[in-house]
Amino acid sequence: MSLTNVLRVINGMRSRRPLLYNSMVYGFFCTSAEFIRQSYSKMSKPIQPVVEESRDITDTRGPVLIRIHKFCGMLGLADDDTSMQSTDYNRSQLKRFAIYGCFLAGPILHGWYKWLDAFYSGTSTGIVIRKLLADQFILTPPLLVVFFTSMSLMEAKSDVLRECKIKFLHTFQTSCAYWLPVQLVNFMLIPPSLRVTYVSIAAFCWVNIMCYLKSAPVTENASKK
């Protein structure tokens, strides 16, 4: 199949199946960003911990959570062996980002922006500001919770909320610093014909940041509080 035919198929999918198209594109962004992050980590120093946390962690898994973890293990999503991660790619992590992008973040973002553009139609300064505030303070917090908890669930962690509690505030602050100016430039300066390209590049950069924050380890104190 020639490149022209491939582009024709992609354009047809984008117009006829926008949900499928957006989900696949975002899943590709997530997986590619994590692949780049792992490639870079092989040539750089270890990532510094985000915060400190006590090492006493209670296993809060119930019967339903245990079954979910077993199912994730069958799919090869949990990290059974971390000894090779310094010399080989963490394929389980790549699978987790692909699932998150295709089946969670992609559909959520597709529905959200479809509603947002319909509810706040226009390009006036007031409309743009409303879109920015709604996107950052209504969508972003629950989406970050979904990101960290779904990743912990697929990693078969005993406490699926622990990482979210530790990294949520820092990640949300980073998203404010990144997306508010990015989206302001998008709605105010970027021509409509280049908007999709601009947002795609911006989203890919953000997913790289998310991969970096997700991979940041947690330092545990030896003493009990």
Image: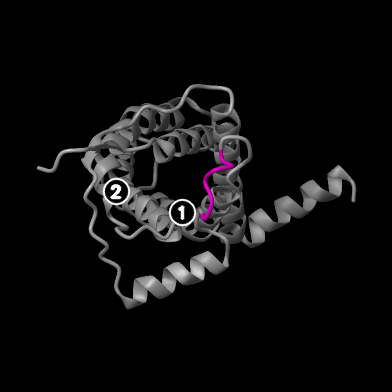
Looking at the rendering, which quadrant does residue 68 occupy?
A: bottom left
Q: Which residues are magenta?
A: 80-85
Looking at the rendering, which quadrant does residue 225 occupy?
A: top left
Q: Could you say which disc has been placed on residue 105 in the image?
A: 1
Q: Residues within 10 Å of mark 1 (few under 14, many from 20)?
A: many
Task: Name which of mark 1 and mark 2 comes first in the sequence.
Answer: 1
Q: Could you say which disc has been placed on residue 67 in the image?
A: none
At x 53%, y 59%, the residue is: 77
Residue at which label 2 appears: 164
Mark 1 vs mark 2, CA separation in Å: 16 Å
Viewer can see residue 129: no
The percent position of residue 85, horizontal first and vertical second, equals 56, 40
The percent position of residue 194, horizontal first and vertical second, equals 59, 32
Q: Residues within 10 Å of mark 2 (few under 14, many from 20)?
A: many
The percent position of residue 189, horizontal first and vertical second, equals 46, 25
The residue tagged with tag 2: helix, strand or loop? helix
The residue lying furthest to the right in this view is 1
Based on the picture, tell me whether residue 179 belongs to the magenta stretch: no
Which amino acid type is marked by label 1? Ala
| Main SS class of the magenta portion in the image | loop
